[in-house]
Amino acid sequence: MIPLPPCRRPRIATRRAVVQTLAASLLLPAMGAAQAQIAVSTAINRIARYRALSQRIAKVYVQMQLGVLPDQATAALAAAQKLVRSGFEDLQKVPWPAELAGQIAAVRGAVDTLQALLVVPPSMPSVLAVATQADRVLSIANTATEAFEKSSKAATAKLVNVAGRQRALSQRLAKNYFLLATGGEFKGAREELASDAQEFRSAMGFLSAAPLSTPAIREELALGEGQWLFFGAALQRKADARGLADVATTSERLLEVTDRLTNLYDAALKEVLG
């Protein structure tokens, strides 16, 4: 819970009541204010996950093209596609207002297009098509995530969004490393590698300094910092057999940590709202 000075409790309580009233008006009247806010928190997590899923799908698809740990890549692709389906199933359980429902539909349309491309065995042309569509999904999912964060009205919802973006960055960094390793022309991939690494480090600092924290969150942040050292070092390696394998494995481990971290922030936000 976020500690509040005693003198500010009445103002915060009033503001929270207003927030909950606004949140309740977003969803069907049958849903309570707290339930509506919790539903939005879950949605931020689920929608944000499509940013990471898009990049993970593209990453393992390129990984398959390169022949790097093919069994691991095949298993990761299957796992990502399973999460794609379950995410939309969860989101469909809530009667969203038209604007937010439209955001979900846009993400789903872009994801369906991406999945349709995966039936083609990896080749340089198909890798380019998958990578391009994955970036479209990332952009659309990011817009949707921000729309849900705005609808939450809770400042702490930003933490779920930022932690969720760390998942996506871990995968986009590895994807761009693999794209460059193919020797193909992928405009902006090298520049994105540098900027994403800086953004990841900056976001870890932002999360560490956030007032909303728990022992579990602090533990995952420490694990994330440690895993980032391994992943960052792998990204600096030459794209030889060892370098490619190291990026493949460390990116998956960092994804696991940042996913747990996002879920912990989601749970902490629900506790605050509830």
Image (cartoon, helix red, strand yellow):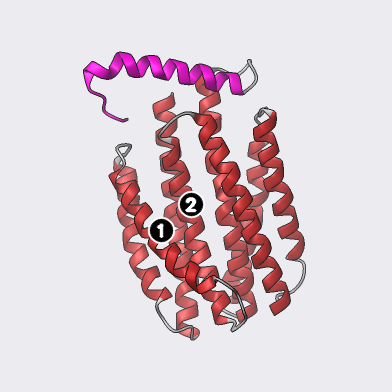
Boundaries of the magenta span? 1-26
Quarter where residue 57 is shown: bottom right
Q: Nearer the viewer, mark 1 or mark 2?
A: 1
Q: Is residue 55 above or below residue 180?
A: above
Inspect the magenta stretch and tell me whether residue 51 lies in it.
Answer: no
Residue at image x 43%, y 69%? 194
The picture places residue 270, in percent across and down from the top left corner, at 44, 30
Residue at image x 34%, y 47%? 207
Image disc number at residue 252: none
Give the amino acid at mark 1: Glu
Q: Is residue 6 above or below residue 171?
A: above
- Is most of the magenta stretch helix, strand or loop? helix
Tell me if I can see residue 144 in this picture.
yes
Give the amino acid at mark 2: Arg
From the image, which quarter does the C terminus lie in?
top left
Residue at image x 35%, y 53%? 204
Instruction: Kindly identify which residue carries mark 1.
Output: 199
Q: Residues within 10 Å of mark 2 (few under 14, many from 20)?
A: many
Q: Residue furthest bottom?
A: 240
**N-terminal of the two: label 1 or label 2?**
2
Horizontally, residue 165 falls left or right of residue 74, namely left
The picture places residue 80, in percent across and down from the top left corner, at 61, 57
Which residue is more in the foreground, 206 or 225? 206
Instruction: Kindly identify which residue carries mark 2.
Output: 165
C-alpha span from label 1 to label 2: 10 Å
Horizontally, residue 194 falls left or right of residue 103, namely left
